[in-house]
Amino acid sequence: MRPLRHSCLGLVRKAYVDLLGQRGGNVIGLSLRSLRSGSVEKDRTAVEAAAAIISRYDPHGWDRIRSNLRMILVSEALGPEFWPSVGACVLDSRSIEEMHPMQLASTIVHEAAHARIWRLFPVYSAQYALRIECACRRAELNFLERVPDSAWLSSALRGPVSRLGASDEKTERRVEQLIRLGAHRSVIAAYRCIRRIRSDA
């Protein structure tokens, strides 16, 4: 059974997307929506470039992504992550702007792997977090084996997946996003504390 906190969070996220999400049309058969202000054209161009790489070098993989995801959602400061409540691969705007298209494609493959695992086993348990992350990393590497001139990215992804390391990396990425949003230092300190408690649980 899904923990209550995840169900409540899912409802909040769904309402957030329904109320604020701008529709960006379809990207090779997958819906694109944006939570940031302004035009979605730049987001659309970047996501289309990434999707084109996946559909060209792994067309069956792209079909699976479309069946496991309902949308790609661009946020001002959240992501990359998978939101089960709306079936979305969430990408943050800075990743969209700074990532090489191949990196963005690899990220979409990773989050789509989370979506597939969630569809098969829709209950989150911290004890499986490392195994799930390893499976999603393998999905990225398997995809990159099909893409020419991707050795530089594959080598960067071949390091060990440490549960603590992955948790710390995600925490610091979130802290950086909170700083960009102007969060007070007490909020940042509280967030770090909560993350430590959850990783020790």
Image (spheres, rainbow, N blue to C red):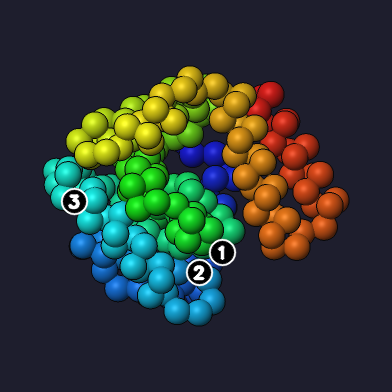
> Pointers 3 and 1 in contact (CB under 8 A)?
no
Number of the label disc, if any, that sits on residue 55: 3
SS state under label 2:
loop
Q: Quadrant of residue 141?
A: top left
Q: CA distance from mark 2 to mark 1?
A: 7 Å
Residue 107 horizontal/vertical position (percent): 39, 45
Q: Residues within 10 Å of mark 2 (few under 14, many from 20)?
A: many
* Amino acid type indicated by mark 3: Ser
> Pointers 2 and 1 in contact (CB under 8 A)?
yes
Q: CA distance from mark 3 to mark 2?
A: 25 Å
**Which of the marked residues, 2 or 1, is nearer the chain's N terminus?**
2
> Residue beneath label 1, please?
76
Q: In the image, 146: left or right of 178? A: left
Q: Quadrant of residue 173?
A: top right
* Amino acid type indicated by mark 2: Leu
Q: CA distance from mark 3 to mark 1?
A: 26 Å
